[in-house]
Amino acid sequence: MILRGKRLGFSLDDIVQLVELYETPKDTLPQLEYYLETLLKHKLNLLAQKSDLEEAEQECRQALMHPARG
């Protein structure tokens, strides 16, 4: 769980919370729901970052194709 969280780019706090959930003998349904919610939030953040990266890449490509003359 720790390695998976690290590979997915979760914060240390998120990883600790997920590990603590899995170490308790409670019902697994709330654990899975929390994990799914955490995954979806992280996915949305990554998609936003991807969009920002693509926009920056496009701006750089445009600048290379049309260099400013000064």
Image (spheres, helix red, strand yellow):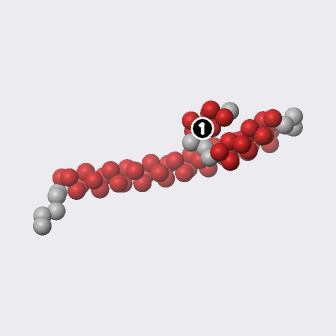
Q: Which of the 4 image quadrants contains residue 62?
A: bottom left
Q: Is residue 53 above or below residue 24?
A: below
Q: Which of the 4 image quadrants contains residue 36?
A: top right
Q: Is residue 3 visible?
A: yes
Q: Is residue 2 above or below residue 70?
A: above
| Numbered label tally | 1
Q: Looking at the picture, tell me which residue is in the foreground, 39 or 69.
A: 69
Q: In percent of the image, x 16 and y 62: which residue is there?
A: 68
Image coordinates of residue 44 in percent, x first then y, are: 56, 50
Left or right of residue 64, residue 19 in this image: right
Q: Is residue 1 above or below residue 15?
A: above
Left or right of residue 34, residue 9 in this image: left
Q: In percent of the image, x 22 and y 56: which residue is there?
A: 63
Which residue position holds label 1?
Answer: 6
Image coordinates of residue 29 in percent, x first then y, are: 80, 38
Q: Quadrant of the C terminus?
A: bottom left
Left or right of residue 69, residue 32 in this image: right
Q: In percent of the image, x 20 and y 52: which residue is there?
A: 64
Extreme residue toward the left, this view: 70
Count residues near mark 1 (Cα–Cα under 10 Å), then give few for <14, some for 14-19, many for 20+: few
Q: Is residue 36 visible?
A: no
